[in-house]
Image (cartoon, coloured by chain):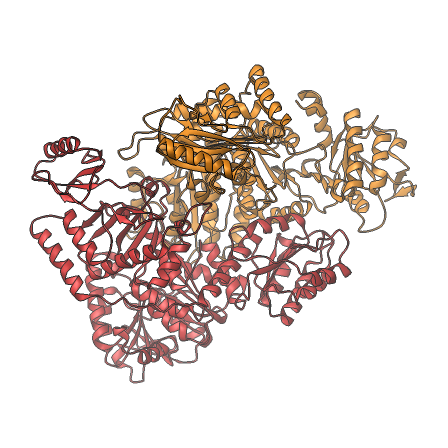
Chain colours: A red, B orange
Amino acid sequence: MFGIFGNKNKKEKKLEKFFNPSSVAVVGATPKSGKVGNVIAKNLLELGYSGKVFLVNPRHDELFGRKCYKSLEEIEDVVDLAIVAIPADFVVDTVANSSGKIKNFAIVSAGFSEIGQVGKEREERLKIIAKENGLNILGPNCLGFINPEIKLNASFAGGMPQAGNVAFISQSGALAVALMDIAEKENIKFSNLVSVGNKMQMSEAELIEYFGEDKNVDVIGLYLEGINDGEKFVEVARRVSAKKPIIILKAGKTDRAQKAISSHTGALAGSDAIINEAFVKAGVIRAENLENFFDLIEVISKSSAVKNENVIVVTNAGGPGVLTTDAFENKKIKLAEIENKTKEKLMEFLPSESSVENPIDLLGDADEIRYSKTLEACNDAKAGSILCLLTPQDQTPVEKIAEKIIDFKKQTDKNVLVAFIGGEKIEQALKILQENEIPNVPFPDRAVAALDKYYKWGKNKKSPDNIIGMKKKESRAKKVKEIILKAKNSGRTALLFSETVEIMKLYGINMVDFANAKDGILGGLNFGFPMVAKVDSDKTLHKTDKEGLILGINNQEELEKGIEKLRVNFPGENLIIQPMQNIKMELIVGIKRDETFGPVVVYGLGGIYTEIFKQVNFLIVPMNKEEIRRHLLASNIGFLFRSTRGQKPFDAGEMVDILHSVMELAQESESILEFDINPLLVYNDKKSVAVDVKIII
Amino acid sequence: MFGIFGNKNKKEKKLEKFFNPSSVAVVGATPKSGKVGNVIAKNLLELGYSGKVFLVNPRHDELFGRKCYKSLEEIEDVVDLAIVAIPADFVVDTVANSSGKIKNFAIVSAGFSEIGQVGKEREERLKIIAKENGLNILGPNCLGFINPEIKLNASFAGGMPQAGNVAFISQSGALAVALMDIAEKENIKFSNLVSVGNKMQMSEAELIEYFGEDKNVDVIGLYLEGINDGEKFVEVARRVSAKKPIIILKAGKTDRAQKAISSHTGALAGSDAIINEAFVKAGVIRAENLENFFDLIEVISKSSAVKNENVIVVTNAGGPGVLTTDAFENKKIKLAEIENKTKEKLMEFLPSESSVENPIDLLGDADEIRYSKTLEACNDAKAGSILCLLTPQDQTPVEKIAEKIIDFKKQTDKNVLVAFIGGEKIEQALKILQENEIPNVPFPDRAVAALDKYYKWGKNKKSPDNIIGMKKKESRAKKVKEIILKAKNSGRTALLFSETVEIMKLYGINMVDFANAKDGILGGLNFGFPMVAKVDSDKTLHKTDKEGLILGINNQEELEKGIEKLRVNFPGENLIIQPMQNIKMELIVGIKRDETFGPVVVYGLGGIYTEIFKQVNFLIVPMNKEEIRRHLLASNIGFLFRSTRGQKPFDAGEMVDILHSVMELAQESESILEFDINPLLVYNDKKSVAVDVKIII
């Protein structure tokens, strides 16, 4: 599966050396201050890295008081990692010439696929060399990486973050730099910071895989603008996120640069919603924005997994308590019910005006003793987390309270978070809290939001479904292929109704009865009035727009008139008649081909509601029926399959079968560009029926 | 309208003295450190207030080296304001005894309505004294207030914020204290900070009114947990927000402690959604949460109104640029199209790899000159705002760039905002920016969100509708009253169908035909088959639940059988028959009585969609038809009244008439507790018809 890295064990070893090299060479080291090659050389030499460092630059014999090599080949020692910071023109040859000996490269140089055709070709050559020689290449066009554990700064960003448990992978170098600066202030500690640049070869999937195995890493955070291989990403991330949280900030939500497509489902399927769905499937925590991303790293890197959904809030101010209560709206975590025995304990020492309901209000004059006793009283409560709020009133001993919270954290297995609200008056306390790894988020809403995502991750991870690959049924696939080929050969881009009926039959999807009416009205129909007459053509996809659809035909005369009208308006086109269906509930089911994630099954309310509410649901292929069922019931049409006030529910099993069949079709027939059933009429007293099926080839 | 303050001019004068007193007395001044009366006395004496200060405490002759009075009456000078900080037991008499001479009181003492019945009675007495003597009373149970302009700290919070343009009104004292601390760090300056406590008399409406007239105030910010008088609030806020922005953080969103009510509309009408609607009507900016509240104050207090929706983003980092682009999703403000002449200017000096599209990417090595030239090149652009992003790369001269932004701000009429992303590396620059009143919001999403709300405020304020009071039609109201009275007298809590038909006729709402069928099947009906038979009873409100509704009756035999069945199942109840309607689109229209805002008209999709999407719309009474039309078209059922793909639109005028009629009914008949039309069937080819109308009395 991971060809470029060979088998799994081999791969791990390889990246192990990449990120923990015993010797590093810098190609392009230079004495010119401010130049990239200069910064990297200094970062390697001056920040405490204890491995061997080789400087390479053909124009120097000596640099920084040590020998300078003409080329990588000239170095006789083993070089575990080469950092390449020379003009793009020379990069490919440099790598090629040393590829026999050196297997790991961080290519900092720009001038590759990001600059257009010339660069793309250059990158392509590099890729081939990497593949042929089994190289690991980071970049090109990246900042490099930093491994604080061994004090290795193999990048041109200055500084050395504290060593810790966060692996951060960034598609933006600038963001990595900003994060380092914020992290220093917030006491966030890193196992690795990796700038991935063009992600030519080492991409999110490979790095998630590697850091998933790295024992120093508790949390993997990624800033991504794109995903290289959707299927692989989901497979790897799903496996790793069952062990440790993966937090992703995915930029480019508003990138709506989608080709104009003719089907409803296509137009509805915003790629960002599909990414959401893929992240859910992969068990990834998606950050809402940059701030939420930092909050998540702060909270998750400093806490153990959230034990349960119950949270106790302790506050010295009513207003922020109420606001925090609001923050729990639409969350999975919730304000814990305070148990009676805890209340009794609290009432022993709290003033009578205090509240022993959650949020527990210690009143404005609360001192460190009141906080401390309250936390202790709550230690036996069933809640998994405690959030301590504080506003700095004049009489509030802020630092002392912080110390008490730290003391409590040492003796409890609950998550303890802090949201102190203020300016200078709380600064010193925040410093103390940070030094002691108590996560602090400045506003209670943000603390609740981050904790909620962490909780949901833990809950989902408990049931990591194995992705069951779907088996292609080759004979069926072949039949579909033949039908499509025939249509293509006759110059059509859409299938005729009769052809879609054939295909739907292969997949067990019930379609409305029909008869061809192009050349004359048939006698001996299987169905009676009322009927529908319509044009069946790839040129008339939106039938209602162009009056290619006649509803409510009640007798032979109307039928003949209707067919005649269609024949005049759409000369030469195929015409069909169908029995008119009574409508109970219209759904839509379709296939969208996503650039990143491949075929995606789309479903939702049909009729006008599809476009009005724009709330379709996506299934990332593949899924088994059990997964589809869970998805369906949790979706925005889930209500149809539960008993609502006096309504008999629709048949979930039948719907799951249909969705599964469409998923099989999507996998088996790549030459279907677009597909939708619209409407799929469902009933709670008879079999559902597909009325109109559009297959674009 | 504002009885307690007399006429408008008189009121202004009165509160003028309250907030700008020339002399202040503290009742309860004490030498005991840490006590409220001690803090207030010190705040008055030591923070620079230049007016006269009188200390009152019967137990002392001298305090802080000055005379101490036994009582307020003993003071011979004029006292503009008395601050009362004595036990609750003594407050009422203290105020009463001095109310001839002193008209303004800030009552800090707790022990009033917040503690239950005893306190409530105490507060009631205070209220009466205030009314009888024309007093202005702040609190009770508040922190007091601070007027930095005259260095008056009439509160027991320490410190003196900088004098400026923000009036802050808080229902939480603790939050006011936290805000002061944050404000000091962020350089936010205040005209006033007012803690309103129990809001016995001086409430949001009175204070908005006063600060609306105050020339020192550019922005009014409020933290509210409740609103005293909804109608008055909307009236005042709407008037004031047409002049200056009002920002409200309303807590208590999740307070779902609503009585169980039997109608659909009642259960759906979350009070928070109604507050939202009222804020829209009042032109108020609603803060999403505490952080957004501070952001809004930061941005709005330091900027002039946003000229147009176009925003230019300047960045030295691609990633944050992409994230900022995402932040514009679903916003009214948008990334400006960069005009060609601006692009040309930019291309003269920017490196070729830069982007002159918006966001303008100056690249990671951008220095202050590149920022400065870019800002200047954009000065002629049509965009109303410029947002400057920055991440602190190693080579970034952060402070110098801040200085250039400040220079540019001095020469432009555009709004200039800053979102620097980092930790220690940006701290000094932020200080410089704050000192120079450049609004800084730490993350671009937050900057965009705050600017968007500010822009929308400016746009809405341009068209401040006058609220046109609706005239009650007395004769109609009287007729409704009679019908209701009759029903009440016969022991019913709901009207019969025949009675609702009478009322709907008075309001011009078309109802489905019907016939009574209790005592036998009528001949000579006005309508034919198919028919519907149902129970018409206040005991069977949800007919489908209890099989009190028989649909699709196709002939006389079925009708007789149906009626017989209902008669057996619902002995003694009224039974009716109606013609069965074909359904095109089901809507729901109702009345909900909100505790704060009075009658509210609710409308939305009917049938199963009402409960599924829970997306009803609210109209705050009163409104004229033009306002209703605008609301309807912008609502979630607005799509029905526009031409959608091949669909003839429904009649907006007819729907506006119905909503207006229901609004009139809500105003004219206060004894209607709940009302809903469900379903209201609307068609695009014939008159709409109300099928079922429920009136609970």
Q: Nearer the viewer, residue A616 or B160?
A: A616
Residue A414 visible in image = yes
* Residue A43, picture quadrant: bottom left
- Relative image position of residue B114 (x, y in whole percent): 74, 43
Count the labels in the image.
Answer: 0
- Relative image position of residue B558 (x, y in whole percent): 38, 35
- Relative image position of residue B92 (x, y in whole percent): 83, 35
- Left or right relative to B69: residue A371: left
Q: Nearer the viewer, residue B113 or B263?
A: B263
- Left or right relative to B106: residue A678: left
Q: Nearer the viewer, residue A429 or A79?
A: A429
Q: Image height check: is A199 above or below A576?
A: below
* Residue B267, picture quadrant: top right
- Left or right relative to A455: residue A535: left
- Relative image position of residue A416 (x, y in whole percent): 60, 64
Q: Residue at x 34, y 80 (%)?
A: A13
Q: Residue at x 41, y 68 (%)?
A: A464
Residue B215 visible in image = no
Q: Image height check: is B384 above or below A357?
A: above
Q: Nearer the viewer, residue A265 or B351?
A: A265
Q: Image height check: is B540 above or below A244?
A: above
Q: Quadrant of the N terminus of chain B?
A: top right
Q: Image height check: is B153 above or below B526?
A: below
Q: Residue at x 69, y 20 (%)?
A: B7
Q: Quadrant of the C terminus of chain B?
A: top right
* Residue B192, picture quadrant: top right
- Left or right relative to A164: residue B87: right
